[in-house]
Image (cartoon, helix red, strand yellow):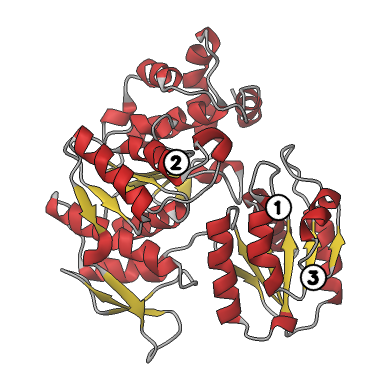
Amino acid sequence: MDYAAARALLDRLPRFEVKPGLERTDRLLAALERPERRYPAIHVAGTNGKGSVVAILDAILRESGYRVGRFTSPEVLDFRDRITVDGVWLSEPEWAEGVERLAPALASATDTPAQFEAITALAFDAFARKDVDIAVVEVGLGGRFDATNLVEPTVTVLTNVSLDHTAILGDSIEEIAREKAGIAKPGVPWVLGSLSPQAASVVESEAREVGAPVVSSQEVEVSAADDVSPGSVALRGAGLPGTVEFALPGAYQRENLRIALRVVQLLRERGFTIPAGAIEEGLRAVRWPGRFEVVRRSPDVILDGAHNVAGARALAEEIVRWVSDAARRHLIFGVLADKDIDGILGALAPHFASVALTRSTSPRAMLPNRLTERLDGLSVPFACYDSVVEALTASLALASENEVWVVAGSLTVVAEARRFLEGDR
């Protein structure tokens, strides 16, 4: 089997259908002889920030000399970028080999696994075959019934809880928190980020029920080091360096950093050797595409996968700090139809001088002309474009050097924008 055949097999599996239960993934892992039991893992859930926490931990652990598997979703640069070992994507032949090992179990399944379930099993198998020391695993959706919830963690993490994927997870903070709390495991420390009182009550109750010790991330302090360079942050906490260069821009990333560093402290308690110098080097080197990522200058183009209301508010606060003159700020926006479009646009659009409405190639994308209805009352000039490439081409052709263009609203839009801009250099 070559890579093209492997992709074709995976693409025949259900991609957008969400099925409750872990039985399908469990059968795939059993067929692969339980790869998920051959290494410890850090399991990270949350509405926002979980990918950034995974990226930070991956960078620090690799600088500490560990062989690290990383699993994230969805892809941003390429279909293969969701599975890495030591920062390197699995090669096309390795993807093909992994799918070939899965193929008999997929063919014999009476209940067809979803594509994400198959890719999760492939990732866990790859980590075992490459003999990783530890895996850092991002939850795909929710937690309790997510395919990744069969991993065996040494630490679990919940970054935050806000409204997203309400049709699947529930339409209240309490319901969503309960689903995300489903990754808690007996005896496994559970690091919590900043939670609302409603979410915290549910999460702590679930933790008590399963016997998971709750660990606050508040024991670590992260603040801007204003007297040094803009990328510097000051750290306070046991065994942490003082002032470091942090490569991920955006004030909201400091919260993700705080959570990740609390995990580092717990890993040390569990026998992992993580020197202060490795923390410094990891934070200087960490990259996370599509999260307030500046991909072009003069004019500035910033990509941010703000795909829910909480993420949109964080992006709005950051762009106002980044560029004080509202006349210089412009938005290219596209979103999937199942999102809180009114809430996201309401949080973002008023902070921009103009909005270019577009859509990704995803079959779930909202059509640009349907988005125009959501701008009523916001008094923001807008234009519609049929594709991300068309929106970027038209917008940047007329842009002046001192303007800032933000591409946001959906990770699929951000991914297409990044691929176009990278290829256009």
The disc, 3 or 2, on the residue closer to the chain's N-terminal end is 2
Q: Amino acid at mark 1?
A: Glu
Q: CA distance from mark 3 to mark 2?
A: 33 Å
Q: Indicate the quadrant where residue 405 lies.
A: bottom right
For the question of whether residue 289 can be seen, the reply is: no
Q: Amino acid at mark 3?
A: Val
Closest to the observer, 295 or 220: 220
Mark 2 secondary-structure assignment: helix
The amino acid type of the residue labelled 2 equals: Ile
Residue 176: assigned label: 2
Which residue has dot 1 on it? 416
| Residue neighbourhood size for the residue with mark 3, other residues' Cα within 10 Å, grouped as few (<14), some (14–19), many (≥20) | some
Residue 177: x and y in percent read 39, 43
321, above or below 196, in the image: below
Quadrant the N terminus occupies = top right
- Element class at badge 3: loop
**Front one among 224 and 215:** 215
Coordinates of residue 225 in the picture (x, y in percent): 36, 84
Instruction: Count residues near mark 2 (Cα–Cα under 10 Å), then give few for <14, some for 14-19, many for 20+.
Output: many
* Residue that carries the numbered disc 3 in the rendered image: 380
**Whole-percent x, y for residue 191 in the image:** 27, 52
Tag nearer the camera, 2 or 1:
2
Q: CA distance from mark 2 to mark 1?
A: 29 Å
Query: 113 left or right of 327?
Result: left
- The quadrant of the rendering that contains the C terminus is bottom right
On screen, 69 above or below 327?
above
Q: Is residue 14 visible?
A: yes
